[in-house]
Amino acid sequence: IKGFSVMGVRAGEYGRQFPEKGRENTAAIWAMADKMKPRVDHEYRLDEWRAAFDSLATRKVVGKTIVRPDL
């Protein structure tokens, strides 16, 4: 995939260094939690992990692939 950037921050360390900002950021994330709806392409049982891996390796996935031990 081209034309995108991924950036991150060690949130735990940031929260320790700047406790008030850390609390504000955590509250903002929780406030958005119900608005974030990732597209799930397929859910696999744990014993189907090879099929899940193959779907990722062959780029057949559009969205997220989930491997669930409880299915």
Image (cartoon, rainbow, N blue to C red):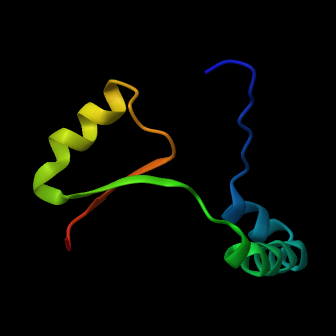
Quadrant assignment, res 57: top left
The quarter of the rendered structure image containing the N terminus is: top right
**Location of residue 57 with respect to 16 vertically, above or below:** above
Residue at 89 percent across and 79 percent down: it is: 20
Q: What number of labels is visible?
A: 0
Quadrant assignment, res 30: bottom right
**Location of residue 51 with respect to 69 vertically, above or below:** above
Residue at 83 percent across and 72 percent down: it is: 25
Viewer-proximal residue among 4 and 40: 40
Question: Relative to residue 18, is residue 68 drawn left or right?
Answer: left
Residue at 38 percent across and 31 percent down: it is: 60
Quadrant assignment, res 26: bottom right
Residue 35 coordinates in the image, percent (x, y): 73, 72
Viewer-proximal residue among 61 and 15: 61
**Location of residue 7 with respect to 34 vertically, above or below:** above
Residue at 62 percent across and 65 percent down: it is: 37
**Location of residue 12 with respect to 32 vertically, above or below:** above
Question: Relative to residue 12, is residue 41 drawn left or right?
Answer: left
The quarter of the rendered structure image containing the C terminus is: bottom left
Residue 27 coordinates in the image, percent (x, y): 80, 81
Question: Most extreme residue toward the top, as rendered?
Answer: 2
Residue 29 coordinates in the image, percent (x, y): 75, 72
Question: Most extreme residue toward the left, as rendered?
Answer: 47
Viewer-proximal residue among 8 and 54: 54
Viewer-proximal residue among 28 and 44: 44
